[in-house]
Image (cartoon, helix red, strand yellow):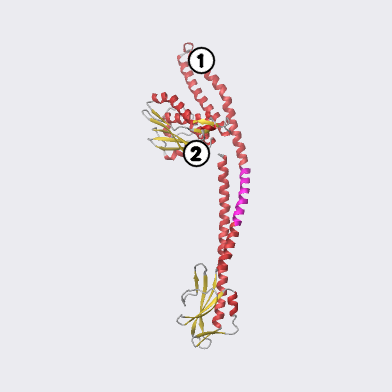
Amino acid sequence: MLWVIKYRLLFSYLLVVGSVLGGFTLAVRIFVNQSLEQEITEKLINLAEGAAASSEYTNGKIKLDNDFPIHDITNRHQGLQWFNQKGNFLQQQGENLPNLPLYPHVKKQIQSGKNPIVAITLPIIGSEDGKLIGYVRASESLENLNKTLNKLDWGLGGGIFFALLISGVGGLWLTRQSMQPIEESLQKLQQFTADASHELRGPLMAIKSNASVAIKYPEAIRETDLEKFQAILSATKQMSSLTEDLLLLARTDIILNQEPSSVNLEEILDNLYKLYKPQAEAKQIKIKLQLDQDLYVLGDCEQLKRLFTNLLENAINYTSLVGTIEITSRSIGSHIYVSVKDTGIGISPDNLEKVFDRFWRADESRSYNCGGSGLGLAIAQAIAKKHGGLITVKSELGFGSCFTARLLSTSPFSK
């Protein structure tokens, strides 16, 4: 379906744009975070160096020079802590002071929690003898940093959202513009298929009628000519079947033939069971029918009949002698599932994705003279999709296949 291709293109386009924007946003976030952290670290280093240069250790106490701006520490939500040579706490000033043990060899420490704090520790060296006096630790809360990063995250996230929104609208327009020539070409091809199939019906019917008349009166022709007419009639029947399938497939691709109505699937399946039971028994195939009640779906009765006819004919054609075919149904939520299971030749796992392709046949199936056009399953799938459903297949080579049609259910009172 073209709409599937459209949305795949749009999704791929948005995925690429989103990945580029996401990578750019992550890079900006990391750069800003590192820059702000580096700025705080440099401020604390300057503060600790200034405090260390202005500190004097006298009688077990730390004294600061009078010109040291101690009040600025509080205004900037920073703090200072002093320790002696052994790392024992002496005194402190300011706010946002960490409760971390002192590690003299660790310059930078971070205290996590509700109010994270970053701290920088520097040694205090005596100005006269150059000996170690103690340590000073400058600290600052990371609350403002986190608030700034949160604002940045919201801003970048909002920017990505609106960028994707605008890109989605633009991508949808570009997708429509790029798909328009393909849609027009496909519509012309579908219309040509429908017109060609329709025009071929007349000549094929004339050939079929004349061949049938000749075979009806064999005494008027030679025996060798009779075989030729029989071959002509057989080929004409196959071409007529192919033409009808192409015409139906072309019409199904374009639009449903009629307004949808409530259709009783139980009645359709029961009639098909009675119709094909003699054909199955002629091949010694046992056919079973087990259906739930109230199997109503919204759609076109004739097309749904064709859907299950194709599934049942496919099961009969590819089931060997003394086989079994089971037709079952179940209702789950708002969907109805109808399964046609056979004990036929099966399909290899590599070919499961190809069974609904037009004109495709597995190598194993060519050994059976089925006389089909290779369009039956493609037609069934097209009808199912037109009804908002889907046909899935499970198969094992040599053991059989199970085709399941999923359709939207509807109430019988909506008829």
Relative image position of residue 15 (x, y in whole percent): 56, 51
The amino acid type, in three-letter code, at marker 1 is Val
Name the disc covering residue 334, or none.
2
**Looking at the magenta stretch, what is its main secondary structure?**
helix
Viewer-side label of 1, 2:
2
Q: Name the residue under label 1.
A: 213
Which type of secondary structure does the marked residue at label 1 adopt?
helix
Taking the view exactly as shown, the residue that stands out farthest to the top is: 219
Residue 28 or residue 110, whichever sits in front? 110
In the visual, does 160 lie left or right of 306?
A: right
Question: Is residue 174 magenta-colored?
Answer: yes
Q: Which residue lies furthest to the left in this view?
A: 322
Which quadrant: the N terminus?
top right
Distance from disc 1 to disc 2, alpha carbons, whole Å, reads 53 Å
Highlighted magenta segment, given as a residue range: 158-178
Q: Where is residue 95 in the image (x, y as percent from the top left)?
A: 55, 75
